[in-house]
Image (tube, grey):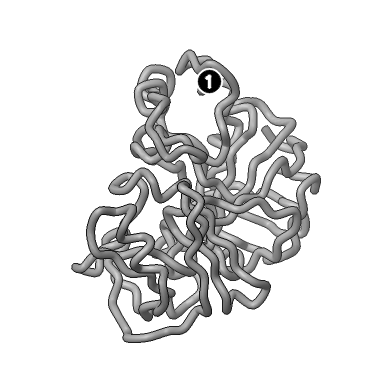
Amino acid sequence: MSGVDGTVAWIHVAPIKALAVQERTRVELGANGIAGDRRFCIIDDDGRMLNAKRVNAFVAVRPEFDDTMRHLALRLPDGRCAAGDVALGDPVTVSIYKRLEPARVVEGPFAEALSGLAGQRVRLVRFDHEGGGVDRADLGGAATLLAAASLDALAEAASADGPVDPRRFRMLFGIAGVPAHAEDEWVGREVRVGEATLVPGGNVGRCAVTSVDPTSGTSDLDTLGALARYRGAVHTTERLPFGVWAHVKTPGTVRVGDRVRV
């Protein structure tokens, strides 16, 4: 696959883990990822991160920050809105992906709104450090890549009624113009994405969150069954693989439409 050319099809970030992803047309990719991406998360009373696998409805909550990320509005699926300044309160230690990260509780109306959806008391927190909420941060992972054509392959395997929404998979960069699952062959190689250079470190194994529709928050597509059927025998670094995670070798600007070169 040397010399393969593609283009950036989408850029998706998630300022608050588990809640709706946001589309961007231009980002600055740094060593720890994109500033503000996955900077916040939701935790239970034990300090454990809550994701949409535990509360499906979270994926349908749209967070809207101002440019400084000091004011937040949470738009709930039923039309209600919880808004206020991002005021930081007590320190807390968050259990996330078998590691511990320091954070501070976000005060205001957000916990009550999210607790209503979760059916239990939860808190919104902000990690102390950029990259604290990024998956595989302990391995140096700061970005994710998925060939757009991989979605078509999954749609066929799952006998989907239409295209599979890429937001289900919460991948940072979608890559158009390359074959389905071409990203599997990029592990360990340099990939130029816009002005940045990435080195994929492994595959992204999938969980039940991907079965949840990102608009309705209901489980409606057997993504895991489809992956098991047509990807189960593929030799990859994680089970049920769909996309890859990557280190950032060279930071830089990435825009939708930028060239991708392996």
| Res 28 quadrant in image | bottom right
Tell which of 107 and 206 is nearer to you: 107
Residue placed at 51% from the left, 70% from the top?
Answer: 83
Q: 82 and 183: which one is in front?
A: 82
Q: Label 1 crowding class (10 Å Cα cut-off): few <14, some 14-19, many 20+?
A: some
Image vertical order of residue 236 relative to residue 63, above or below = above
Q: Position of residue 39 (x, y in %)?
A: 49, 69
Is 242 drawn above or below residue 220 in the view shown?
A: below
At x 43% / y 18%, what residue is drawn? 230
Relative to 248, 216 lies left or right: left
Tally of numbered discs = 1
Please identify the quadrant where the N terminus is shown: top right
Q: Where's residue 224, x and y in %? A: 36, 28
Which quarter shows the C terminus?
top right
Decide: is 142 above or below 161: below
Residue hosting label 1: 155
Residue at left offset 39%, top offset 79%: 107
Residue 206 pos. (x, y %): 39, 38
Label 1 SS: helix
Q: Position of residue 15 (x, y in %)?
A: 53, 63
Q: Amino acid at mark 1?
A: Ala
Q: In the figure, residue 114 lies in which quadrant?
A: bottom left
Q: Which residue does the image show at 32% across and 69% down from the upper left?
A: 123
